[in-house]
């Protein structure tokens, strides 16, 4: 397997500097700059006064070295806004051009690549965050996801790529990475092989993926990745950006059956060309042992490695306080085999902790973490930062959490909700139990800030379902709606999951007066 040395990307940075300087000098419009800068994983923020930078963390794995580099950059440049994204990356915000250059180049020295973080390129390969330590998993898919991430870097400058190419690996039917509806997904089976799904995705014209192969040997995954590229080259609409996503090929090819036929024809071509894409990976062996210390806490979970624990840390809205991020980085440098794993719902997990180490991590993150299931809700960065954002999803989430806390809604009465500031579904609103998507509502012939409400989506493997769209709700009414819903569920004496399962139209009845 050919791999790209991260250091080789340094030669491309001069072009990025040139275009960035032209943009800030007013010599390049924001659309042209956005089309160029996405290759480097950086975009201008709304207003064009600062940039963001996306640090790819392959498979959501943040080693101690990578975390230390990021913390050092945060301190050096006084960065005040960090975001854990739903694609398992770390975004740094409000950066001046010189800060972007410095971080982008230095990151390559520790194996953090920003190239292809945006634009028409393979995005960060996703992986179940607790792969390798989770008791319920079928097998550890992390090494295979990492190998896929390395291989996909060879396609950064390939011709005729889809507008995004998102690849995910799941280690169990929980399907946290939405592997069954990514552009390409590898779904673990109990027999330690993968089923392969393709041509799925959320956003406009969402589609669940099509199963194109069953029970493939993990050693063969790169053949399926190359076949995905060849299928898009042959049938993808790369001339129309609005439809330059793999999911539209289902329609072009006459439905799922036509797509399976076309994909497997390309797969046969890949195998026939005799290029050796077989891979072998070394299983991750955690040699660390528990030291007898134990911990019992809502945020601490026992690993399958006896005596070791994982601590869950979900900063509200996926935005960790910089000082907490840095203090946590400092602390884990002295802990053997500890690392951070990012999840697609903006949660971070710190793994391979002894009981005493877990207590320290819990203490460090206590003031900067969700306290309830509802506070674990997901939000994209929102329109105050994102150029294409329609509504400020982060502000809405903050207002909702404040209202729910003040109303003293008990934990469990509300689910994790998903908020996207625009139709792109970065907040995965379409498959959440409750989802909101930024939009508008006409009141007395005047447009008002609103969000479209979706209910009863499901992301679990075998249960996938798009949420039903109920209608537009004024932004100002959403906190009130959620308080009303929480009170209704609490008064039933049940948790939300039970209450909602018994009558899937019950949410509709509560929401009706607010729509």
Image (cartoon, helix red, strand yellow):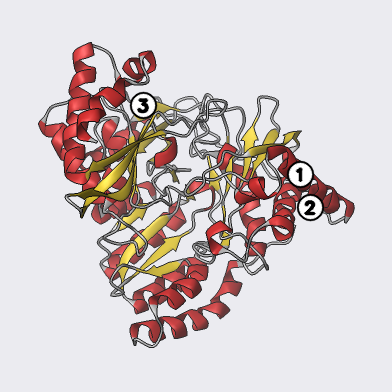
Image coords of residue 487 (percent x, y): 18, 22
Q: Earlier in the sequence, mark 2 or mark 3?
A: 2
Q: Is residue 357 visible?
A: no
Q: Tell me whether the residue at label 2 lies in contact with that at label 3, contact meaning CB atoms closer than 8 angstroms.
A: no
Residue 460, placed above or below residue 273: above
Kind of element beneath mark 1: helix
Of 362 and 149, the residue lying toward us:
149
Q: Earlier in the sequence, mark 1 or mark 2?
A: 1
Q: Are marks 1 and 2 in contact (CB under 8 Å)?
A: yes
Image coords of residue 332 (percent x, y): 37, 47
Residue placed under numbered mark 3 in the picture? 293
Percent coordinates x, y for residue 186 in the rendering: 64, 39
In the image as oriented, which residue stretches furthest toward the front? Answer: 445
Report the residue at 62% width, 35% height from top. Answer: 187
Q: Quadrant of the C terminus?
A: top left
Between 162 and 360, the residue placed more toward the observer is 162
Say few, some or many: other residues with alpha carbon within 10 Å of mark 3 (under 14 / 14 to 19 / 20 or more).
Answer: few
- Label 1 crowding class (10 Å Cα cut-off): few <14, some 14-19, many 20+? some
Cα–Cα span, label 1 and label 2 = 7 Å
Q: Quadrant of residue 342?
A: top left
* Residue at mark 2: 277
Could you tell me if residue 432 is visible in this image? yes
Depth check, front residue: 25 or 303: 25
**Element on which disc 2 rests:** loop
* Mark found first going from the N terminus, 3 or 1: 1
Q: Nearer the viewer, mark 3 or mark 1?
A: 1
Work out whether 420 lies above or below 370.
Answer: below
**Residue position marked by numbered label 1 in the rendering:** 220
Give the secondary structure at mark 3.
Answer: loop
In the drawing, what numbered circle is on residue 154?
A: none
């Amino acid at each position: 397997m050919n791999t790209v040395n991260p250091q080789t990307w340094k030669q491309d940075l001069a072009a990025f500097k040139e275009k960035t300087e032209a943009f800030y000098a007013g010599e390049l419009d924001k659309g042209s700059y956005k089309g160029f800068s996405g290759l480097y994983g950086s975009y201008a923020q709304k207003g064009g006064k600062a940039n963001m930078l996306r640090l790819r963390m392959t498979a959501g794995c943040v080693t101690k070295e990578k975390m230390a580099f990021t913390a050092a950059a945060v301190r050096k440049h006084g960065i005040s806004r960090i975001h854990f994204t739903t694609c398992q990356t770390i975004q740094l915000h409000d950066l001046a051009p010189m800060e972007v250059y410095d971080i982008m180049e230095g990151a390559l020295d520790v194996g953090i690549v920003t190239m292809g973080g945006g634009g028409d390129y393979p995005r960060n390969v996703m992986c179940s965050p607790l792969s390798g330590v989770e008791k319920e998993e079928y097998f550890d898919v992390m090494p295979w996801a990492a190998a896929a991430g390395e291989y996909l870097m060879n396609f950064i400058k390939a011709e005729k790529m889809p507008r995004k190419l998102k690849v995910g690996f799941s280690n169990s039917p929980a399907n946290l990475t939405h592997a069954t509806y990514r552009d390409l997904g590898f779904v673990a089976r109990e027999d330690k092989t993968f089923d392969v799904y393709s041509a799925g995705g959320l956003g406009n014209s969402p589609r669940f993926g099509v199963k194109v192969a069953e029970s493939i040997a993990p050693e063969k995954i790169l053949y399926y990745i190359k076949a995905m590229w060849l299928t898009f080259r042959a049938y993808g609409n790369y001339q129309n950006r609005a439809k330059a996503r793999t999911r539209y090929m289902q329609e072009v090819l006459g439905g799922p059956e036509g797509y399976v036929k076309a994909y497997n024809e390309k797969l046969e071509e890949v195998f026939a060309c005799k290029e050796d894409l077989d891979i072998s990976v070394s299983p991750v062996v955690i040699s660390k042992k528990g030291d007898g210390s134990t911990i019992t806490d809502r945020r601490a979970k026992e690993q399958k490695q006896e005596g070791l624990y994982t601590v869950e840390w979900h900063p509200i809205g996926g935005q960790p306080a910089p000082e907490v991020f840095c203090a946590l980085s400092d602390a884990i440098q002295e802990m053997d085999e500890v690392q951070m794993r990012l999840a697609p719902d903006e949660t971070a997990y710190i793994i391979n902790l002894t009981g005493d180490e877990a207590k320290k991590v819990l203490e460090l993150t206590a003031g900067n973490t969700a306290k309830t299931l509802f506070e674990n809700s997901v939000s994209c960065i929102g329109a105050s930062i994102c150029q294409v954002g329609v509504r400020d999803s982060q502000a809405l989430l903050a207002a909702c959490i404040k209202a729910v806390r003040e109303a003293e809604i008990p934990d469990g009465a509300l689910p994790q909700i998903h908020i996207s500031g625009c139709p792109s579904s970065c907040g995965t609103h379409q498959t959440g139990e409750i989802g909101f998507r930024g939009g508008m509502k006409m009141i007395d012939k005047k447009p008002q800030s609103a969000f479209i409400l979706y209910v009863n989506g499901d992301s679990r493997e075998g249960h996938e379902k798009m949420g039903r769209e109920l209608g537009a709700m004024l932004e100002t009414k959403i906190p009130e709606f959620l308080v009303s819903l929480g009170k209704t569920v609490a008064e039933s004496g049940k948790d939300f999951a039970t209450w909602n399962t018994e009558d899937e139209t019950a949410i509709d009845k509560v929401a009706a007066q607010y729509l």
